Amino acid sequence: MSLPSYARPAPAVRAATGWLPRGDALPGVDWSWRHRMVCWVLALHIPVLALVALLSERPVEVLHVVLPLGALLALACLTRLSRRMRGLAASLGLLTGSALIVHLADGSSEAHFHYFVTVAIIALYQDWTVYLLAVTFVLLQHGVMAGQPAGVSYPLGTWGWAFVHAAAILAESAVLVLFWRANEISRRQSDEMAAELRAGRSSVEARLAETDRIRADLIGTVSHEFRTPLTGIRGAALTLLKRGDRLDPASRTALLNAVLDQQERLSRLLENMLIAARATSVDPGAISDVDAVAAEVAMLASAGRPGAGPVAVVVEPGTTARMDRQALHQVLANLVDNALQHGSPSSVPLVAGGIDDRGVWITVSNEGRVLDLTAADRLFEPFTQLDSGATRDREGIGVGLYVVRRLVDVYGGSVDVRSEAGWVTVEVRLQAAGTATRTQRVQQPA
């Protein structure tokens, strides 16, 4: 949820504080090893400071060292507390150790350098609450408890001495904050790169899985679809070779026609597979006459399939589309071939086209079985058929409609399929390239 305008910082404030770290929570593993290191440093202070107290002949001071530092160390190691509370306890323990060192050294200037080390260690938490506690503690301790060294005169007396130390601590803090900010930026960039790598890996794995599926489908479908016509060609050739002299002319003609039919089937399969692999670029200046290409496809489809009926063509004269003629021919040929394969035996496929406000539209319709539109999109995937398997009664390897979509997509068009009143219609949309008069669509036969 975004903040209201009155609650958002002004641009000048955002610009002035942009260099400050955000104080984002560290990852669990990162925070754990840093906290363990701080706790170990705090634990080492206890015996060292106790030994210093004993050597300075202040046995009472040993309790002043062990009790507060031990209690704070125990709180820092208490896992039931939150991360921030444990960090505050460990930080306060180190600060108390610094204060005790200054106290045991009778306020010597050298002892105050321990605060610089303490603030640097506490900065490892990269938590504003913990860090501000450290800076505030140091400033107050210097202002209230620090004594002015003998022989040194400051304008403000004891507070002048405190200001000198406070300025040094703040300068160190500013440097640590800059390193903190740089570390946050580096960690954020690393997280983004890791996320991109994970996303890229997932995408590559998905593509590899899809490629493996297509390869398996290709092997299965090609082995079936290519074996059938090759078996027919081999059988006809062997019959002509061994018994050709005993066959009548009509039988020999039938066998030769069967060879040609099977060869045509293989040619269509290979052509579709090659076009699917090469359909990646277009000719931006290509223009095709839809009416002429549709008539040519209809004539070849009727002549190329023995026993096939006519194909009706109702395309608005002068309709031109921005598509290469060979590509448009392949699109319509695949759609008409699909309509002849899957339509009713007595139905007449219909190719219609024209121009409307959205550009050129071309439809290929056939009367046949009812199409499940929920599974219709799968027909445009490679090596996919609604009736798959080696026992299906229709030829094809599921590449024709995939080629249609590839070619149309490359030329900036779209493909849609619908099923109404027993008719299945595939609609192709292309960019218009002519100025033909726009008319209403041809209605489908009742």
Image: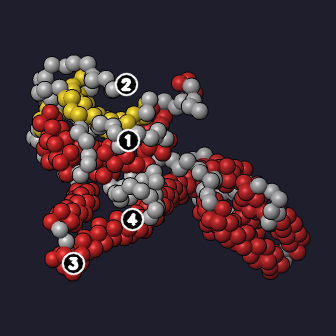
The amino acid on which the numbered mark 1 sits, given as a three-letter code, is Ser
Badge 2: residue crowd in 10 Å (few <14, some 14–19, many ≥20): few
Residue 99 visible here:
no
Q: Within the image, what quadrant is residue 311 found in?
A: top left
Residue 438 visible here:
yes
From the image, tell me which residue sits under label 1: 344
Question: Quick check: marks 1 and 2 in contact, CB under 8 Å?
Answer: no
Residue sitting at x 29%, y 37%: 349
Q: Considering depth in this image, is 143 or 225 the residue closer to the camera?
A: 225
Question: Quick check: marks 1 and 4 in contact, CB under 8 Å?
Answer: no
Q: How is the image coloured?
A: secondary structure
* Rendering coords of residue 423 (x, y %): 39, 34
From the image, tell me which residue sits under label 2: 446
From the image, tell me which residue sits under label 3: 243
Q: Considering depth in this image, is 265 or 98 the residue closer to the camera?
A: 265
User: Tag 2 or tag 3, which sits nearer the N-term?
Assistant: 3
Tell me the element at label 1. Answer: loop
Specify the quadrant that holds the N terminus: top right
Question: Quick check: marks 3 and 2 in contact, CB under 8 Å?
Answer: no
Query: Eyeballing the image, is 314 above or below 181?
Result: above
Q: CA distance from mark 1 to mark 2?
A: 15 Å
Q: Within the image, what quadrant is residue 263 found in?
A: bottom left
The amino acid on which the numbered mark 3 sits, given as a three-letter code, is Arg
User: Tag 4 or tag 1, which sits nearer the N-term?
Assistant: 4
Q: Considering depth in this image, is 125 or 399 the residue closer to the camera?
A: 399
Residue sitting at x 81%, y 75%: 50
User: Tag 1 or tag 3, which sits nearer the N-term?
Assistant: 3
Residue sitting at x 36%, y 70%: 223
